[in-house]
Amino acid sequence: MVHEPCHVVDVLPTILAATGSSYLPELGGHKIQPLQGEPFLDLLEGKEWTRAQPIFFEHEGNCAVRHGRFKLVRQYGQDWELYDVDADRTELNDLVGGKFLRLWADLTAQYEDWAEKTGVLTSSGNNPQTALCGPAEIRPNLAFSKAELYSAPKIRITASKYRNINAVMMPARPA
């Protein structure tokens, strides 16, 4: 059995590799961001596979880089933390500093480069050290007023105990 970290960004490259298709650099005259991720088709076929590039992710200001056995993480508004996930699966022993200072600096620089290339939203310019994709009041261009939220039709999705999923279009509430 092979244990290698994969991420959702690896799914499309894997599908493209399996189908022999190529990634479109643009669609309808609009440039598309470069493809991220790595195909893990060999892994699915039971062959040896090792990830070549780190996995980067950011969600609501929470950031991480996964590279080999190490994971660099930062919760929104906190400092970076470094873990050896092979030795510390519960991420209790922060390794920042000491003999891992160079690794921390390298992974942090790689994250900053990735964040700039991919357009990660931040509170002050595009400085990933202050990554801020959280509260709507900080990003008014992406916030909606209460009237705007109620004026659009809604979709209610429910799941029954029999695992049937139902989607119902709800009429817009009056403002």
Image (spheres, rainbow, N blue to C red):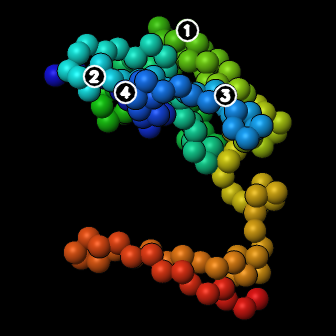
95 is higher (above) or lower (below) than 73: above
Residue at the extreme bottom of the image, as rendered: 174
Whole-percent x and y of residue 142?
A: 76, 58
Q: Secondary structure at mark 1?
A: helix
User: Which residue has dot 4 on it?
Assistant: 18
For the point 48% across and 12% down, the residue is: 100
Q: Check residue 43 in the rendering and tell me which mark sits there, or answer none.
A: 2
User: Which residue has dot 1 on it?
Assistant: 102
123 is higher (above) or lower (below) than 12: below
Tell which circle, 4 or 2, labels the residue nearer the N-terminal end.
4
Q: Quadrant of residue 49?
A: top left
1 is higher (above) or lower (below) than 122: above
Closer to the camera: disc 4 or disc 1?
A: 4
User: Which residue has dot 3 on it?
Assistant: 25
- The residue closer to the viewer here, 12 or 10, is 12
Whole-percent x and y of residue 119?
A: 72, 35
Give the Cα distance between marks 4 and 1.
Answer: 38 Å
Horizontal side, residue 85 vs residue 54: left or right: left
35 is higher (above) or lower (below) than 152: above
Give the Cα distance between marks 1 and 3.
Answer: 35 Å
